[in-house]
Image (cartoon, grey):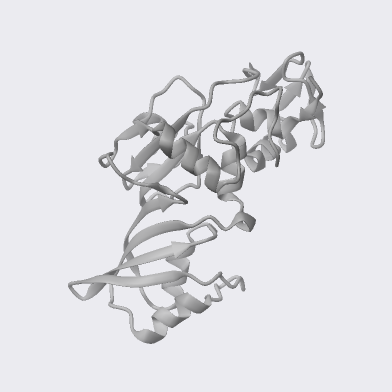
Amino acid sequence: MPQERLQKILARAGIGSRRKCEELIAQGRVTVNGQVAHLGMKADPQRDDIRVDGQRIRADEPPVYIMVNKPRWVLSTMEPDRKHRTLRDLVPVPERVFPVGRLDLESEGLVLLTNDGALAQRLMHPRYGHEKEYRVLVAKAPDAKQLRAFRHGIVLPDGYRTRPVQVDVLRRHGKGAWLRMVLTEGRKRQIREMCRAVGLPVVRLIRTRIGPLRLKDVGVGEWRYLTPQEVRALRAAAGLPAERPSSAAGEGT
């Protein structure tokens, strides 16, 4: 088969998103036939000896798609951690998978685990604008001005202006309120930073949807494999074929 970009091969093998795989290459943690790889390198996954941290990757792992209902105080990583539980502790599957769209330590809800690098790239990259929906409990009930700010975009402390956010008040909760928020981008701690900027401290933050995938039929701290229908819907929303092709066929970026 023709050679492919190394980060694409690594992503398809479940090492991480393409961006994460590029970071691994830049850090010198990837070798091809015993030589340290570099960005821009291509390889043949069927013939070349490709390793990450000394461990050889499988050329074409079967695709895996898992829904996790992440509790608070669990890290969104499949790597071990000395201080906190991680998704690996919740989902001890033999396949090598990685989270698509991480939640911070305090946040809860839907995390997608997969080894489908092409799908992860489409779902996470801001240019594709896939929706992510959240239930957010804020300490004070928002007024009309604060809601308008979300809907027009908010300038964060670093000068970045967020995209407009869909926001609705679901119900009052004591002095605060539960909000429904839908974003089409995913900067680190974005909801918490937006709410802080308009004077609405976040008490709880729960992700309930990624694109067409909704959190359902899985309790807090539990997980399940996606149904074939859910996989097809996700890949269709990402503009990808219903079934992930083999490495011989490849996929578009």
Q: Please tell me which residue is depicted at 81% across the width and 25% down the height of the picture.
A: 3
Nearest the eye: 214 or 156? 214
Q: Is residue 135 above or below residue 58?
A: below
Name the spot of residue 56 as percent of width and height, x first. Answer: 65, 16
Outermost residue, bottom side = 145
Nearest the eye: 166 or 50? 166
Q: Please tell me which residue is depicted at 62% across the width and 38% down the height of the picture.
A: 118
Is residue 53 rendered to the left or right of residue 101?
right
Q: Is residue 114 above or below residue 181?
A: above
Is residue 191 rendered to the left or right of residue 215?
right
> Image quadrant for the C terminus?
top right
Could one spot residue 82 in this view of the protein? no
Q: Please tell me which residue is depicted at 49% across the width and 57% down the height of the picture.
A: 131
Name the spot of residue 111 as percent of width and height, x first. Answer: 42, 43
Q: Is residue 82 above or below residue 123?
A: above
Name the spot of residue 167 as percent of width and height, x first. Answer: 39, 71
Name the spot of residue 209 as percent of width and height, x first. Answer: 40, 52
